[in-house]
Image (cartoon, helix red, strand yellow):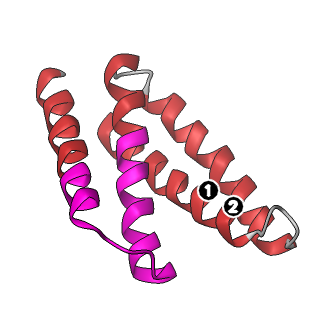
Amino acid sequence: MAWVLLGLAAIFEVVFAMGMKMSDGFTKLTPTLVTIVGIVFGLWFLALAMKQLPVSVAYPVWTALGTLGTVALGTLLLGETMTPLKVVSVLAIVAGVIGLKVSSG
């Protein structure tokens, strides 16, 4: 169950990041509110996951999954470029997440 909670936390981290981008420096109300909701729920689910997972696994996996989701949506929805170096970097993050998951048992 902790991994499901961590996955939800990561989804809300992506919501937070995308909302912040779309808020235009917190000048647009709806995206600003979406950002706040993303922050609150992301941290809440992360805290719940950390009741069962070590911080040395939960926090890095949360940030990595949030990073991966944000890179994907930035590329797909915002037209950001996916360079070869970004692809290699994303693969390195994925390898790190897998390593942390395996190391946690």
Q: Quadrant of residue 103?
A: top left
> What percent of the width, then of the height, locates residue 24?
78, 69
Question: Circle 2 — which element?
Answer: helix
Q: Nearer the viewer, residue 49 or 24?
A: 24
Up-down relation of residue 59 to residue 22 (above or below): above
Residue that appears at 71% across and 65% down: 34
Q: Quadrant of the C terminus?
A: top left
Residue that appears at 45% across and 61% down: 70
State the residue position of label 2.
20
Q: Which mark is residue 16?
A: 1
Q: Nearer the viewer, residue 3 or 36?
A: 36
Mark 2 or 1: the one toward you: 2
Provide the major secondary structure of the magenta segment: helix
> What percent of the width, then of the height, locates residue 25?
80, 62
> What percent of the width, then of the height, locates residue 44?
59, 38
Q: Is residue 32 visible?
A: yes
Q: Are marks 2 and 1 in contact (CB under 8 Å)?
A: yes
Q: Quadrant of the N terminus?
A: top left
Mark pair 2, 1: CA separation: 6 Å
Q: Nearer the viewer, residue 81 or 28?
A: 81
| Amino acid type at image mark 1 | Phe
Q: Which residues are magenta?
A: 63-90
Is residue 86 rendered magenta in the image? yes
| Amino acid type at image mark 2 | Met
Up-down relation of residue 11 to residue 19 (above or below): above
Question: Circle 1 — which element?
Answer: helix
Q: Is residue 14 left or right of residue 19?
A: left
Is residue 52 rendered magenta in the image? no
Up-down relation of residue 51 to residue 77 (above or below): above
